Image (cartoon, rainbow, N blue to C red):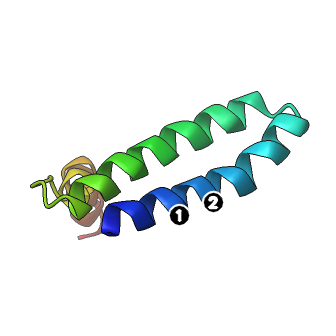
């Protein structure tokens, strides 16, 4: 049930977003949209199918933690 609902939602998103991008020949935006949508689809279907997935917040934290520490040290 959840997977079918996800399919309908993603088809609706694609139907609403892709035609204007193609009509305006916004190819870079279409590629960026497609990549981000694909990442979202993979993650959404993984969650719906109860596949253990990594927490994306941890990846963001790993990237920005050194920068945060550097800024904190500079301010103290």
Seen at 33% across and 58% down, the residue is: 44
Q: Considering the numbered disc 1 on the image, is that residue within a helix, a strand or a loop?
A: helix
Placement of 39 over or under 5, stated as above or below? above
Q: Residue furthest left?
A: 52
User: Which circle marks residue 9 in the picture?
Assistant: 1
Seen at 53% across and 64% down, the residue is: 9
Q: CA distance from mark 1 to mark 2?
A: 5 Å
In the image, 37: left or right of 74?
A: right
Report the front residue among 68 and 33: 33
- Mark 1 neighbour class, 10 Å CA radius: few under 14, some 14 to 19, many 20 or more: few
Residue 28 appears at what percent x and percent y? 70, 30
Report the front residue among 68 and 45: 45
Report the front residue among 37 and 66: 37
Seen at 39% across and 44% down, the residue is: 39
In the image, 57: left or right of 36?
A: left
In the image, 64: left or right of 39?
A: left
């Amino acid at each position: 049930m959840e997977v079918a609902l996800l399919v309908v939602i993603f088809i609706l998103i694609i139907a609403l977003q892709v035609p204007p991008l193609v009509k305006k020949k916004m190819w870079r935006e279409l590629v960026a949209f497609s990549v981000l949508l694909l990442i979202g689809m993979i993650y959404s279907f993984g969650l719906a199918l109860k596949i253990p997935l990594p927490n994306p917040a941890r990846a963001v934290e790993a990237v920005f933690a050194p920068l945060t520490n550097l800024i904190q040290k500079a301010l103290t």
